[in-house]
């Protein structure tokens, strides 16, 4: 019996190879250049690829993958989370075909490694400061107020127009893309006061922590916040509220590009999927519906 | 593979002819299967050790820096210090309190199962304990995050909780997780006390509790310690459930009611955001090495204890 | 004397109440999730595709859990039982058995997240398979094998030596004795070993994050029977996010209005699966024992 099963498996394997071999040669060679027509629909290529990396970009890439594979049932696009560093490492190692990252490869990888990756900017994403609902009377912070709070100069909400209560900071791990973006854009490179702060890494635990910790404040990805609005208070920055429109027109500054990296120029299904990510279908229909702004402003 | 050969062997050969050659082959095949684990340990050890020392070998961080109390791994924030002391102490702290919380319950439960429970109760407890072991740790984490943490935040202000995320929350979740492990190992060691001794003691007219206190507990002392150490080991290796509830503050732990961090929590937090080859990433591997060293030390400790208790 | 009796009664009462409260805790945990999940539960949740915009389902992840479990046990059980036969029947005492035992204890102590990282380096990156069910199953085997071996060995050692002597006296060889006497008698113990080992597989998340994958899977095409095609749900090479990993993921980065409900439902499904698995296998073990030995347990 085991012998028969093994033989069957072997036959199946051989058959499989012939079948995929045939279909591969039947598909037109991937020749699309870097300038694919953005108005075209998804170009179907058979195969299976995996994207991994940034959890902030994951919902977006997942949604796009779902649309693509619905249009092209012969393709599978797996979308993994794991974090920006994982995405960069794995695409470099060849474990995945696409590496999603909130930060540029150059800021993480040594120059030679970074040079072997090709950057595809797929979206503009925003973040915003959020407060526990007990912090009444604070709906906007100027950049200077934010700097004072996060560097530990301001420690009581009454100094920024709130109640007389101590501020509880909930920060991201030092390695996270959210934290480095926030530090770069809002804090202008200054260090957070980490002494008494809580550290939560995922959007889910940040949201829970802000909701349940009196007088807490933190920073969340806008795309995540939109679904969780009633649990906390989102703050405007310098009088500008966070919105897809304000990301796109540049008025709201706490925003940055989302990157999708490939090792060398992509081909086959990888190419087709990257093209699809940059097509109008995704950029101007899918992105706004998921609270991201198009990358190609 | 080996299994196939064995089943075929057994199926194909007429059983009477098996005799001498059959014995040899069976011995060799089963021996090979048993040795796989040695190979795995070797591989795993080499792998962890090699990656764990990259911090010193490749990035030239002095070994003693690992024992520094400050964790500042971010090169964009100025001078870096790869001090792992907050994580080591955090792990030890969270795990010890978990063991302290779980031990009385687990030992009581083991005593109950071994000495007190009537057959019907044992029939209920045994599958219940297996279900307990089977509940996934993420479920405990989710429970901790959605029930325990909000509860502590809302009702624990008098004790000094600012948010529910705390050393205590982590220990409580872990205590629940290791309870079945500790009690089943302790149960085994109670059962290992020869029944003759027990009968003799009871025949002298002592009560059950006297027998437990003066005979059973002293006789299985090493077994009890083994149970607790094994439970602590399992707790130290747990990552996701703990990370969800402890607040992950990378400082030397000071208060039971404030956030702390552990080796596993920091690995889960930072592994995804750092890239292979980066000094920061290498420091995470060093944490892994420290963790494995701690568990191995526990294993050796358990062995010494068991040996002292005499061969089973 | 009365004080002694009182102490005895008190101790007995305390032990009973400890046992009672542990059972209560267990029931409370189970009830909590079942009650939280009940209002939103429909049978279609078990087969539908995952979604957190509306209450979707766990069809593919449930399938993956079962698949990874089966694949792991396919490797672990034969290897573990064979190893146990050696340990219990052949090895006797000596250096080799000491070394094996020490290795079992060491590997059993390695934290699962470390096993996950090891699995990533060896089964995902070095083999070039990417994130696959097979990589997950092999990683799980690493720490389940010693557990399975130890439990199987205990089950065999519990078989009284009289049985062996009787078998030898009838002229049976050692192997015949093992096959026809020791193993059948040990079956209930072996089944317990399989349950405990399988329970760990079902609940494990940390070791699978980096091996079997963290993707949210789309529709599974069961008509695709090609075992080498990573798109086929039957293939060991498909990316296999399991239930526990899925729960961890929606809890940390899940977006959408019904994330909490979906998380509660998923946790409930996990718990019910564990219940069915444990109680079912237990019943099976007892049935087998009655069949084989013709005795009542």
Image: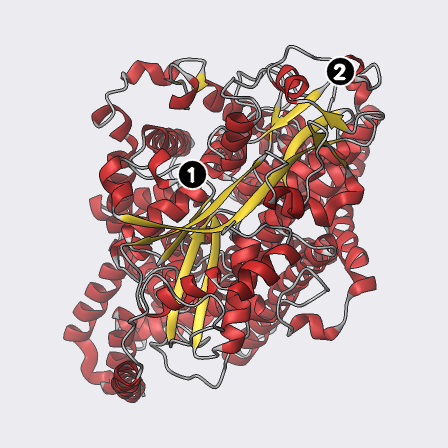
Chain that bears disc 1: B
Please name the residue shown 61% across and 43% down the image: A249
Disc assigned to residue B271: 1
Residue receiving disc 2:
A166
Residue neighbourhood size for the residue with mark 2, other residues' Cα within 10 Å, grouped as few (<14), some (14–19), many (≥20): some
Q: Nearer the viewer, mark 2 or mark 1?
A: 2
Depth check, front residue: B23 or C4:
B23
The tag on residue A231 is none
Q: Position of residue A94 (x, y in %)?
A: 29, 55
Indicate the position of residue C103 as horizontal and vertical percent values: 31, 44
Instruction: Determine whether A112 is above or below C91 in the image.
Output: above
Label 1 secondary element = helix
Labels 2 and 1 in the same subunit: no
Chain name for mark 2: A
Cα separation between marks 2 and 1 = 32 Å
Residue closest to the eye, B63 or A136: A136
Residue at image point 26% right, 52% down: C92
Reply above or below: A56 against A150: below
């Amino acid at each position: 019996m085991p012998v028969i099963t093994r033989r069957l498996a072997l036959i199946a394997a051989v058959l499989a190879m012939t079948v995929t071999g045939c279909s591969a040669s039947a598909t037109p060679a991937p020749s699309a250049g870097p300038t694919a027509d953005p108005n075209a629909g998804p170009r179907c290529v058979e195969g299976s690829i995996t994207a991994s990396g940034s959890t902030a970009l994951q919902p977006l890439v997942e949604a796009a993958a779902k649309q693509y594979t619905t249009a092209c049932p012969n393709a599978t696009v797996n979308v993994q989370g794991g974090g920006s560093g994982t995405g960069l490492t794995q695409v470099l190692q060849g474990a995945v075909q696409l590496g999603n990252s909130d930060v540029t490869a150059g800021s993480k990888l040594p120059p030679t490694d970074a040079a072997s990756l090709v950057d595809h900017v797929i979206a503009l994403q925003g973040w915003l400061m959020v407060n526990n609902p007990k912090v009444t009377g604070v709906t906007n912070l100027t950049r200077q107020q934010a700097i004072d709070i996060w560097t530990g100069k301001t420690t009581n909400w009454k100094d920024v127009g709130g109640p007389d209560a101590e501020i509880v900071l909930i920060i991201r791990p030092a390695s996270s893309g959210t934290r480095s973006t926030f530090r770069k854009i809002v804090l202008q490179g200054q260090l957070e006061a980490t002494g008494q702060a809580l550290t939560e890494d995922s959007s889910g635990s940040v949201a829970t922590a802000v909701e349940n910790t009196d007088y807490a404040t933190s920073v969340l990805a806008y795309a995540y916040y939109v679904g969780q609005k009633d649990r906390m208070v989102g703050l405007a920055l310098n009088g500008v509220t966070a919105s897809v429109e304000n990301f796109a027109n540049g008025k709201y500054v706490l925003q940055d590009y989302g990157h999708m990296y490939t090792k060398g120029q992509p081909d086959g299904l990888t190419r087709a999927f990257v093209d699809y990510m940059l097509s109008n279908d995704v950029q101007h229909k899918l992105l706004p519906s998921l609270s991201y702004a198009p990358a190609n402003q | 593979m080996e299994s196939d050969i064995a089943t075929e062997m057994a199926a194909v050969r007429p059983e009477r002819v098996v005799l001498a050659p059959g014995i040899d082959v069976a011995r060799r095949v089963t021996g090979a299967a048993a040795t796989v684990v040695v190979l795995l340990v070797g591989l795993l050890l080499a792998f962890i050790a090699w990656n764990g020392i990259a911090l010193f070998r490749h990035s030239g961080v002095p070994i003693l820096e690992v024992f520094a109390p400050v964790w500042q791994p971010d090169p964009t924030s100025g001078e870096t210090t790869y001090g792992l002391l907050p994580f080591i102490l955090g792990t030890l702290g969270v795990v010890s309190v978990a063991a302290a919380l779980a031990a009385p319950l687990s030992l009581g439960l083991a005593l109950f199962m071994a000495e007190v429970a009537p057959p019907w109760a044992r029939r209920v407890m045994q599958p219940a304990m297996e279900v307990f072991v089977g509940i996934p740790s993420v479920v405990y984490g989710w429970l901790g995050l959605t029930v325990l943490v909000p509860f502590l935040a809302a009702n624990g202000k008098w004790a000094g909780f600012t948010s529910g995320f705390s050393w205590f929350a982590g220990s409580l979740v872990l205590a629940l997780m290791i309870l079945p492990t500790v009690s089943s190992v302790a149960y085994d060691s109670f059962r290992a006390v020869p029944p003759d001794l027990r009968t003799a003691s009871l025949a002298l007219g002592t009560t059950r509790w006297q027998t437990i206190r003066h005979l059973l507990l002293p006789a299985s002392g090493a077994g009890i310690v083994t149970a607790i150490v094994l439970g602590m080991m399992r707790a130290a290796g747990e990552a996701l459930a703990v990370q969800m509830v402890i607040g992950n503050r990378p400082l030397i732990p000071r208060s039971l009611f404030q956030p702390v961090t552990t080796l596993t929590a920091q690995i889960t937090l930072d592994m995804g955001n750092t890239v292979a080859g980066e000094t920061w990433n290498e420091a995470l591997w060093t944490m892994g090495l420290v963790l494995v060293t701690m568990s191995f030390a526990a294993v050796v400790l358990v062995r010494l204890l068991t040996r002292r208790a005499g061969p089973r | 004397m009365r004080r002694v009796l009182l102490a005895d009664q008190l101790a007995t009462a305390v032990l009973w109440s400890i046992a009672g409260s542990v059972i209560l805790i267990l029931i409370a945990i189970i009830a909590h999730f079942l009650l939280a999940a009940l209002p939103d539960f429909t049978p279609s949740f078990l087969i539908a595709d995952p979604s957190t915009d509306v209450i979707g389902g766990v069809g593919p992840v449930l399938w993956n859990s079962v698949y990874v479990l089966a694949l792991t046990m396919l490797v672990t059980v034969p290897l573990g039982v064979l190893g146990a036969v050696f340990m219990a029947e052949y090895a006797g005492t000596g250096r080799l058995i000491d070394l094996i035992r020490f290795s079992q204890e060491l590997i059993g102590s390695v934290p699962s997240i470390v096993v996950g990282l090891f699995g990533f380096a060896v089964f995902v990156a070095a083999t070039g398979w990417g994130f696959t069910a097979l990589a997950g199953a092999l990683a799980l085997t690493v720490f389940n094998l010693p557990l399975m071996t130890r439990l199987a060995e205990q089950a065999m050692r519990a078989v009284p030596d009289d049985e062996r002597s009787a078998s030898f006296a009838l002229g049976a060889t050692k192997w015949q004795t093992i096959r026809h006497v020791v193993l059948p008698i040990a079956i209930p113990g072996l089944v317990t070993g399989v349950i405990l080992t399988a329970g760990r597989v079902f609940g494990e998340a940390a070791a699978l994050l980096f091996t079997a994958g963290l993707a949210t899977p789309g529709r599974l095409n069961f008509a695709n029977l090609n075992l080498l095609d990573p798109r086929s749900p039957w293939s060991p090479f498909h990316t296999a996010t399991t239930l526990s990993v899925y729960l961890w993921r929606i809890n940390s980065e899940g977006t959408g209005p019904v994330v909490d409900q979906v998380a509660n439902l998923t946790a409930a499904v996990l718990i019910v699966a564990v219940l069915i698995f444990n109680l079912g296998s237990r019943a099976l073990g007892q049935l087998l024992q009655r069949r084989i030995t013709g005795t009542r347990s």
